[in-house]
Image (cartoon, rainbow, N blue to C red):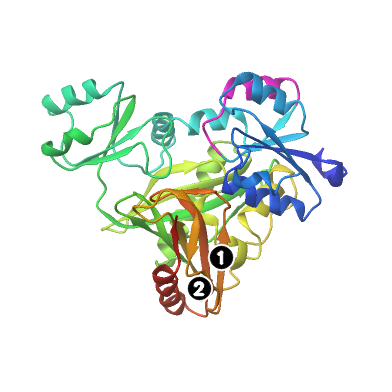
Amino acid sequence: MMNTVNISDLKLGVIAGGQLGKMLSLAAANWDIETYVLDTDKTCPAAKSCSCFIEGDYLSYDDVYRFGKQVDLLTFEIENVNIEALKQLQKEGLSIFPKPESLELIKDKGLQKLFYQENGQPTAAFQLYDSKAAILKAIQQKEILFPFVQKLRTGGYDGRGVAIIRSEDKLENLLDGPSLIETCVDIEKEIAVIVARNESGNVKCFPVVEMEFNASANLVEKLIFPASLSKSITDEAEEIATSIVDQLNFVGLLAVELFVDKSNRVWVNEVAPRPHNSGHHTIEGVITSQYEQLLRAILNFPLGSTAIKMPCVMINLLGEPGFHGKVKYEGLNETLAIEGVKVHLYGKKETRPFRKMGHVTILANSIEEASKKADLVKDRLKVKS
């Protein structure tokens, strides 16, 4: 159906208007697609880049339902959405991609892990618990051994909702709520594969990226593209991503985060059913960006080339520790003077420590050269107030 539609008349709904919604709106504008964005914040990053901003709560059944009735096709940039409204809209004939059923499974990290277990995907051993009290009891009974990772089943993002408990004296850091407890993997590297699948079942993976995390905030600080791994490992990672997207019968864009352990075994960590921080580099570093690829997938168009243009390093631009308030950028002139540097500012008006305020992609002839320039950018460009 989507192949015969007048694309200039298409109204694409995007639930949530953060930086992902902004960049998706900008990509849609290249194809003259109207974008409608639903968000609680009238000053959200996507508010200025979309065709029509609608204020509303994406957790509200009524707000999501009313929003869906105004568009021809619906997608989202966040998992925490009212699923029942999406299901009703789909029942009434609205095209929603990824499908509500996929979102419902993925937004619950416990259901995600059960899915991997049932479908033979390599993932760390885990147990599910209903509360902090149940976790403490399991520790007393030696059902849970140190060290372990706790993840709240729902609501976590950007390092929130995750606690790494290495010993008994760190139990004060336990989170309260339904959780999965995961055995710690002896991690050598953390990697990601973004994979797209359209309604026709065509699948394409972006090349594997390597991620480095900020220890304090537990979120991605630096991304290396392509990953410095053997072909056998990158092939295995792409095969895992492809099999997951097929097993889910998924339509859209799926970010698959994985671990490589000290023995070079590859493990699935978790997935996100949307554009992802680990794919920002594709805007400049790959022939087809992750945002255009999402549009191609949900419109059932041919998927675009994922060939590499140039090696690159991407760094997240985070709010500096100790600064809260109206945003100010320090070192922007010096940063833009560096060849190959592409700065993306999300337009968030207020900064706070470790808040994602933008990203910078540094392209060069080699990863080594890009990494040196990335270090310069990191030293010079600061988000303060």
Instruction: Residue 309 in the image: state x and y as whole percent.
Output: 60, 72
Does residue 201 appear left or right of residue 361 in this picture? right
- Residue 331 sits above or below residue 266 on the image: below
- Mark 2 residue type: Thr
Q: Which residue is mark 1?
A: 343
Tell me what residue is drawn at x 55 percent, y 45 percent.
254
- Is residue 45 in the magenta section? no
Q: Where 82 falls versus 305 (above or below)? A: above
Residue 85 magenta-highlighted: yes
Q: Provide residue 285's location: percent of width, then percent of height.
A: 58, 67
| Nearer to us in this view, 312 or 345 | 345
Nearest the viewer among 65 and 338 is: 338
Q: Can residue 307 be seen at all in this image of the molecule?
A: no
- Which of the 4 quarters of the picture holds residue 184? top left
Q: Amino acid at mark 1?
A: Val
Residue with the mark numbered 2 = 335
Instruction: Say which residue appears at 55% left-offset and 40% top-offset.
Output: 273
Is there any visible trace of residue 266 in the rendered image? yes
Residues at marks 2 and 1 touching, judged by CB atoms closer than 8 Å: yes
Q: Earlier in the sequence, mark 2 or mark 1?
A: 2
Q: Looking at the figure, which quarter contains the N terminus?
A: top right
Q: Residue 5: name its quadrant.
A: top right
Query: Closest to the observer: 14 or 122?
Result: 14
Disc 2 secondary structure class: helix
Q: Is residue 43 above or below residue 363?
A: above
Q: Which residues are magenta?
A: 78-93
